[in-house]
Structures are given as structure tokens and as C-alpha cells.
Image (cartoon, rainbow, N blue to C red):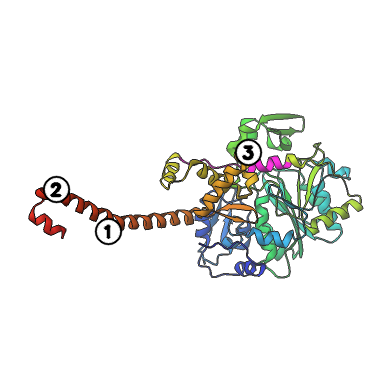
Amino acid sequence: MKYKNRETKHEVIEYLQSYFLGIGFQDLKELVIDKNNCVFCGTCASLCPRIGINEKEIRLLEYDPECSTCFRYCPRTYFPKDMFEKELFHDCMNKSNTLGFYKKGVVAKSNDDEILTVAQNGGVVSSLLIHALDTGLIDGVLLTDRDEKWYPKPKIARTSNEILSCSGSKYTIAPTLSIYKDAIEDLKLEKLAFVGMPCQIQAVRKLQLFSPLSEEYGKFTLIIGLYCFSNYSYDLMKLFVQGELGVSLNKVKKIDISRGKFYVYLNDGLIVAPIKEIKKYNWPSCQYCKDYCAEFADISVGSVGASRNDWNSVLLRTDIGAKLFNDAIKAKKIISSNKIDLFKIEKETLRKKIRVTQIDKQILSAIKLLKISDFEIKTYMTLMSLGNASVSILSKIMKTEEPEVRNALQKLNQREWVIAANGLYSTVNPTLVINNEIYNLRQSFFKNIKKLKTEVLTNLEALFIQNNFNHVRHDEILDLI
């Protein structure tokens, strides 16, 4: 069995241009939406007028021509990481199995008091966007704003004031890319920036590679990703903050999550709740996301890794991101320091990557029919949760010595349950794995049947006759001839 995992840029563009794959919205619904894997980015609704979107649902409004556009550009379908890594991070010095590629990690803070007043932490994102706008790198940015009830609203910001109006984390899932079409068809914006969650960025990178809406407008020239452990539905605000906490949403000034606590800042006070109380409002697909620090962004920004809440930790990943950041430093728009705690970011990243979905006991019992050890099953499931990992990372997560992990991986590799490339292991699709095991079982079964007939039965018959000849009737002997 051979697996191809190194597509070229040209091949990926050809795929994105393919309108005749014979798949459509129903496939997207069955494989992504119904599997609780939709990240609610709004890309499909922006690219197809037949797809609608409301507070919680993506749905088909008209007939489905099966052009496959919604499926191809969904961030939860085909995304060749190797190709994008090669194109985006070809000269990166640092490659971390947990943090991804990055040139440098720093902590930073805006130099503008007006920005700091409305910022979630250090105001770095707002400062960089305004600088990018002032220098002509972008002429618009796709952001998430909110109304007085904290309902998230995708917004195209074209001025510094519009950028500042969107400052601060919303902690509510938002279809930020649903307005991509408006930026192209209504506003004719040529150079776009995007700020959003790690999961959304994969759709943006596809659109950056080839946009089905325009060759002239809507080119993404800057992508800023925000650290994210989990996001929430609007029920967090409507049912928890307003319902359980009894807080009027128009009195909420700021929302924050830090050190296992959920903070609600009011105009005249502060309410703190344990984060476990809001887990029931988690967006479903977040439990399957492994990207904490936006590994495919130009610049990744968060608060973890900074020593103070009024600073940001920043990972500069691409040439574009590093150049913009350094230009902003020279222009004295931001200040920075090398005192970043990468270990804290790595710790949060690993915590997100190792959220292994519990395997049903009946399934576990069935897998054991394949004569595979519990440890090998655990290794496969852990690796599936991580996406890919080295022996050392698996050893650390599974709290097992490297030789034992390596031995399990070698056995799984021989059985074609995992594949290895460049020192990293990844799991093979379970459909291929089980079908391959069924094929091997069938082959082994027929081989054993043949052996039973040609060897075992023949020898047993001869032995039986030799030792029980007086008891064998004539017609039985004839049957055996």
C-alpha cells in the first residue's frame, strides 16, 4: 500500500480549480457538519449563494449543482500541510513539533494608549493592522465585531477606527469569512488581512492560493492567528452570562479566560466563574482541533507566554509577518522584548493536541480481535489525536520510555496502521486500516481452510482408518477414497 503525502503547489491549485469532482453540499454535510467537525468559518456561505448560515447552522437553500466549491474550500477537508509548510516557511530556522514553524518568539505591546484602552491584552494585533493599513500592505481586514448583546458580527474594517471598534476577544464562534464575497464584489478590495482562529486559517490559505471569486480582488496579504484552546457558541453569553449569572449583556465590558477561570468584566464590577461551568457551551468541533497557536498564520498572537496580562506573546512565522512586525518596531508603533516563555505556550499546545477521544469498550474489544496489544492501540489512538508526532513527543505524552514507543510504532508501521516521514509518525485512515486487516484475515482464513483440507484432514483420515479399521463400514471407506 502506498501513500502520497507530498503534493506540489501546482497540484493543489489544480484541485482547487476542479469543479467536476462529483461531490457537493451533501458530502460536506455528511463528512463535516454531521460529524461535528464544522468550524463555522462561513467560507462555504461566502463562496456559494445556495448556502445559508444562521446562529448555529450551515444549510442548503436551493438545489445542489455539486460544483464541489463548498467542499474544496472547507478548512476541515483536504489541506496538504507539507505543501503549505514548504511554501510558507521555507527559510524558518525553528521547527517545533508543538509550535510549528516560526522565525522568532517575542513578547510585545502597543505604544498607543488609545489602543491599550480597548485592547484585550497588549494591543499588538490592532497596532499591526493599523500599521499595515497605513503602509499600504492591506486596504481592508476581515474581523469580528459584536453588537450590544455581544452577538458576533463579521466586519470589513478599512480605517483605524473600524479596526479599534473590533478590539477584544469575543469567545463566541463567528463566521468571519462569510463577508469575503462582500470585500470583493461590493468594496473591490485588492489586499486583505484576516484575523481569526487557527481552524479558520486553513480556509484562508486555500483562498490565498486560488480564489474562485476573483483574480484581481480579495488577495490575502496578511494572516494573523489568535491562540485558541476552545471556542464557544453564543449560548455562552445568552444562557450562561445572561441566564445563569443574571448579567445584562449590555453591561458587559470585557470577557476573558485565564488560569482556569472565566472573567466577566462589568462597567461597575467583576464576576468570576470556574471554567468547568462553561464547558457545556464549547463549540463541538473544538474537541477535535489540534492547533492552539495558529501554526499556519503569518503572525500568531496570544497572552500565554507573556509575563504580564498587558503584553502579548508573538510568534513570527513568515517573511511577511516578520517584516511587518519589524517595521512596526522601527516606526515605534509597538515595543518588544525577547523574554517570552515558550515553555508555557508549548504546554498549552500539547494540552490541546492530546485531547484523545475516548474509545468505546465494545470497539476496543473488537479491535483486540485483530491480535493487537493494548499498548499498540493506545499508541495508535494517541497518534490519531495528535495528527503527527515524533517518538520523543509520544514518549513524553504517553509517559513511556522511548524504546517501547518506538517498538509499538514499528509494529504498527509493519501492519500499515501508521506511516513515517521525516522523523514524524501519523496514522493511516481507519477505513484503509480496517479494510486491509479484513483482507488479511480473509486471506489467512482461506489459507487455513486449504491447509485443513489438504493436510490436516488427509492425515487425520489416514490415522483414523489405521487405528479403527474394524469399525469402518465398506461404504464409509468408499466415501473416503
Spot occupied by residue 282 in the image (x, y as percentages of width and height): 60, 41
Q: CA distance from mark 1 to mark 2?
A: 21 Å
Spot occupied by residue 137 in the image (x, y as percentages of width and height): 82, 61
Quadrant showing the C terminus: bottom left
Q: Which secondary structure, mark 3?
A: helix
Residue positioned 44% across, 56% down in the render:
435
Residue segment shown in magenta: 345-360
The image quarter in which residue 93 lies: bottom right
Q: Which secondary structure, mark 2?
A: loop
Question: In this orientation, does residue 149 appear?
Answer: no
Spot occupied by residue 364 in the image (x, y as percentages of width and height): 45, 42
Query: Which of pointers 1 and 3 lies earlier in the amino acid sequence?
Result: 3
Position of residue 440 relative to residue 235, above or below, is: below
- Residue at the extreme left of the image, as rendered: 474
Question: In this orientation, does residue 241 appear?
Answer: yes
Position of residue 295 relative to residue 49, above or below, is: above
Query: Which of pointers 3 and 2 lies earlier in the amino acid sequence?
Result: 3
Q: Nearer the viewer, mark 1 or mark 3?
A: 1
What residue is pinned by disc 2? 468
Q: Nearer the viewer, mark 1 or mark 2?
A: 2
What residue is pinned by disc 3? 236
- Label 2 is placed on what type of residue? Asn
Q: CA distance from mark 1 to mark 3?
A: 69 Å
CB atoms at circles 3 and 2 under 8 Å apart? no
Q: Nearer the viewer, residue 52 or 171?
A: 171
Q: Nearer the viewer, mark 3 or mark 2?
A: 2
Is residue 352 one of those drawn in magenta?
yes
What residue is pinned by disc 1? 454
Q: Which mark is residue 251?
A: none
Residue positioned 40% across, 46% down in the render:
369
